[in-house]
Amino acid sequence: MKPNNPATPPRTSQWSVYLLRCGSGALYTGSATDVSRRLAEHREAKGAKYLRGKGPLRLVFKKAIGGKGLALSVEGRIKKLSKARKEALIDQNGMIEEIIAQAKKASSRRAERFAVRRSSSHEYASDVLTIREARRLALARAGLLKPKWTGFPVRAKGSGKRARDAAAAVIRRFGYLQLDTVSIAGARSHTIVLLSRLEGFDPTLGEELLRPGSPHFEYWGHEASWIPLELYPAFEFRRREFRRHPWWGDVVGEHPEVARKLRRRIRDEGPLRSIDMEGRGSSGWWDLKVAKRVATALWSSGELAIRERKNFQRTYDLAERVIPDEVRGRPLTKRDGFETLMLKALDGHGWATTGTLASTWRLKNHKQEVAAALKRLAEKGKIMACALEIPGVRATPGWIRSEDRELAASLETVRPRPDRGVLLSPFDPLLWDRARVQRLFGFNQALEIFKPAAQRTYGYYCLPVLSGERLVARFDLKADRKRGALRVLSCRFEGTDNSRPAANRDGQAARSALTRYADALELKTTGWRLA
């Protein structure tokens, strides 16, 4: 679809001007005069080479017009820009014209892009991403491209401070690390997520990250998760809501004596492991003994906290003995908490729909608050509406941070290696939103752990293989620690739907992914050979 012809922006300070630099992450914003002045100062300090570095410059003019957002943007080559359109971007002091001239020299990669875009679903200036741009951005923000693009450490060998800091960086990027009990593949999901990003990471450390003094806490984020401490204030709204437990109702009110004894025991005797709680449980998955239910309810409301986990067993303690006072003492309002969580979700996703952002924190029942938070962030210039262009289909509305829009442009020339693979957890932050995975990767992320064996297509606990920017296969694995073996129960490649790859590079990627994973667990693979 051809872009509309832009109206000439009036030469007035009512227009906000954004100058974004692909690759460097630099962003100047303000009036046209402000941008011109700041650019001139930077050029004086660094010279004209600054404008001829990697990646194009991009100008965005924004102004609310008739209740709708209007964005004028120039990216990459602008040789074909008409005189009328060029004059529309000239500021009264002429500096914007000079910026355009320098931008023309700076870019040799991107085609002309000068457009007025009106968003039918948002009241703010919007932009557009291609599927490839959104996919590569998702991989970069997820820490699955080279460290140059992800900002993650290259390696995290051992189990000392360096490895713990690297793991904390991964958790901080997403805002959570989802916990899961299943360990049939030799490691639980939270450890697999770290192994896939941090080569050389000790898998035993993945089970011991939560301990006194850790930079994260355990709470309901995206399911039960380890979450950076700096996000503790943002969850004040949830602690208030969960005073009545979402599954069991007013379990504390129904069992006041159990709650009183539990509080007193922990206060007087110290931290209490869940396995040491008195009471008798039964065999049902959710039919927990009363003491555990009450402890979970008190934790959910913020009265108790998880001090540490050992062998995946929780140890409860009073919140004031686990969460630092400087963090507990500054709870955020629901309004500010939602803004904080939406920004953090975008930090890990890159580009995302409103639905994905809400699901990141299980906020599907807070649609109005989520929409309002996104609107405020857009008005503040912290995020921008951005649609995903899908050939032959109506564009999908979504959101992106301004700096990530420029990162997406910088990734245009990246060439991820297609012959080196990595195994991903089925609960990986990149994969849990099945619709998003299908949209960006064309991959059916099937989770069959809850299906009867006869109804499964791929396997009980399949780990997809990421090769470059493609998901090319999936392994169903079972670890046998006593024999030191990692059994391949099944391997299915995309394109053939069997154990034979559609291309040699897919097979090489699957083999390297399986080898890396098995080596990390110190197991020998059995049951599969690349044909």
Image (cartoon, rainbow, N blue to C red):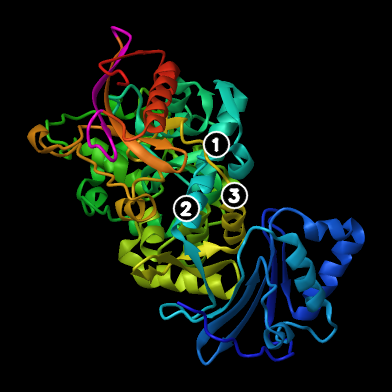
Q: What is the residue that sits farthest to the right in this orientation? A: 44
Query: Label for residue 349?
Result: 2
484 in magenta? yes
Q: Looking at this view, is 81 or 139 the one in front?
A: 81
Looking at the image, tell me whether mark 1 or mark 2 is earlier in sequence order.
1
Query: Label for residue 413?
Result: 3
Identify which amino acid the numbered label 3 is placed on. Answer: Thr
Disc 1/disc 2 C-alpha distance (Å) = 17 Å
151 in magenta? no
Q: Residue 44, how many percent across, how many down?
A: 91, 63
Identify which amino acid the numbered label 1 is placed on. Answer: Ala
Residue under the image location 60 percent in, 44 percent down? 149
Q: Quadrant of the C terminus?
A: top left
Q: How many marks?
A: 3
Residue under the image location 67 percent in, 88 percent down? 9
Part of the protein shown in magenta: 482-499
Q: Residue 480, how many percent across, how many down?
A: 27, 13
Q: How crowded is the residue under tag 3: few (<14 C-alpha within 10 Å), some, or many (20+)?
A: few
Disc 3/disc 1 C-alpha distance (Å) = 30 Å
Q: Quadrant of residue 312?
A: top left
Looking at the image, tell me whether mark 3 or mark 2 is earlier in sequence order.
2
Looking at the image, tell me whether mark 3 or mark 1 is earlier in sequence order.
1
Disc 3/disc 2 C-alpha distance (Å) = 20 Å
Q: Residue 151, how many percent across, how many down?
A: 62, 42
Q: Which residue is mark 1?
A: 168
193 sits left or right of 159 in the view: left
